[in-house]
Image (cartoon, rainbow, N blue to C red):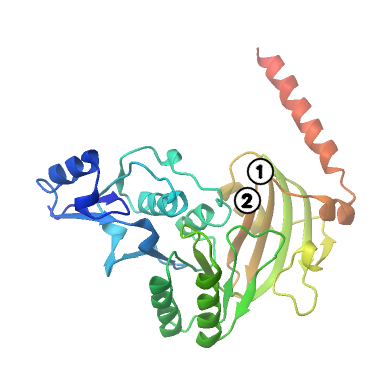
Amino acid sequence: MNLSFGIVTTNTYSRLNYEKQAIYDNAVKHFKHVLLIDPRKVSYQFIRGVQKPIIRYLGRNLANLSALHIRGVKKIANSTSILAHSLDVCGCILSDPIYRFKTGYGSKLLSTIGRHEDDSGSSSFIAFDLDNTLKLVASIETKKLFPIIVKPINGKQGEGIYLLKTAAEILAYTNLFFKQRMDSDIPIFFQTYVSFVKEYRIFVIDKKIIGLVVKVKEKGKIVANAAQGATFIPIENPQQVIVEFILDHLPNGIYGIDVAIDTTGGIHLIEANASPNWKALQESTGIDVAAVIIQDTLKKINNKKGTS
């Protein structure tokens, strides 16, 4: 069998510790390919409509890697986390349960993988170093995917989002990004720009829609975000396709959802914020969101008492 085995490390074989060398030496007896993988040198292409992501490392696509061994992740937690989660959806066997590999930027990194898996997100591109980013830019240009949106993975309220229309613009942004970056475990993050017919902000509790507004961008803005001057217009009855989408894609819990519909009728999950702000939605709808949350909590307590 053409099996392949990966070991996450930033070192060469001669600099591996005893445990990793032992894993490597045993793996070469059973696997055709054994790779030492520096996760900061891996790039990702999550193309909408394509089942598996493209996971590039030193010219090789890791999407078919059989197994991945991960030990320490100090200083490479973000890059290791996205590698582990990306390979997990590809069917790769991981040395530890997937929940072990978390990142502080889950809303941008790990959620990108989930949206690709269920085909609910826009095409996305991630790289941790300049060389791989330049290769991504070349791929974006070849596939004619401009314009591209660039987002900071630790951004909020629409800050730091730019629309890049040409290869020259994306190259200028890329060079500046890596010149100013202070942490090699922080990646650059691109997404294809999609023209949306409608954008919605939806407040959801346990898959039930509590409040719904249509978001209208301020003229000249890239995103329809309240902090960026967007107007929220309340509506009573969401499209059935939106309701079904929420039922299919969200677990129970409290969420502020940004959903959009493109010109072909496709639905894009822009964000599912588990710690949402609701001031703008409350002001536009008149719904006392805090009161709804407390009432829902009391109902759950009473239901629990009734079953005990």
Q: Is residue 277 above or below residue 169?
A: above
Given residues 239 and 81, the one toward you in this image is 81
Residue 267 location, quadrant:
bottom right
Q: Is residue 9 above or below residue 58?
A: above
Name the residue rendered at 27%, 70% in the picture: 59
Q: Secondary structure at mark 1?
A: loop
The image shows a total of numbered marks equal to: 2
Given residues 150 and 276, the one toward you in this image is 150
Residue named by callout 2? 246
Measured as percent of width and height from the top left, residue 235 is found at 82, 59
Name the residue rendered at 40%, 66% in the picture: 50
Q: On residue 207, which mark appears?
A: 1
Residue 176 location, quadrant:
bottom right
Name the residue rendered at 64%, 60% in the picture: 155
Amino acid at pointer 1: Lys
Residue 221 in sight in this render: yes
Amino acid at pointer 2: Ile
Q: Secondary structure at mark 2?
A: helix
Crowd class of label 1 (few under 14; some 14 to 19; many from 20; radius 10 Å): many
Measured as percent of width and height from the top left, residue 11 is found at 28, 54
Q: On residue 166, which mark appears?
A: none
Q: Indicate which disc, 2 or 1, sits on the residue closer to the N terminus.
A: 1
Name the residue rendered at 73%, 22% in the picture: 301
Say whether residue 134 is left or right of residue 150.
left
Say whether residue 293 is left or right of residue 244.
right
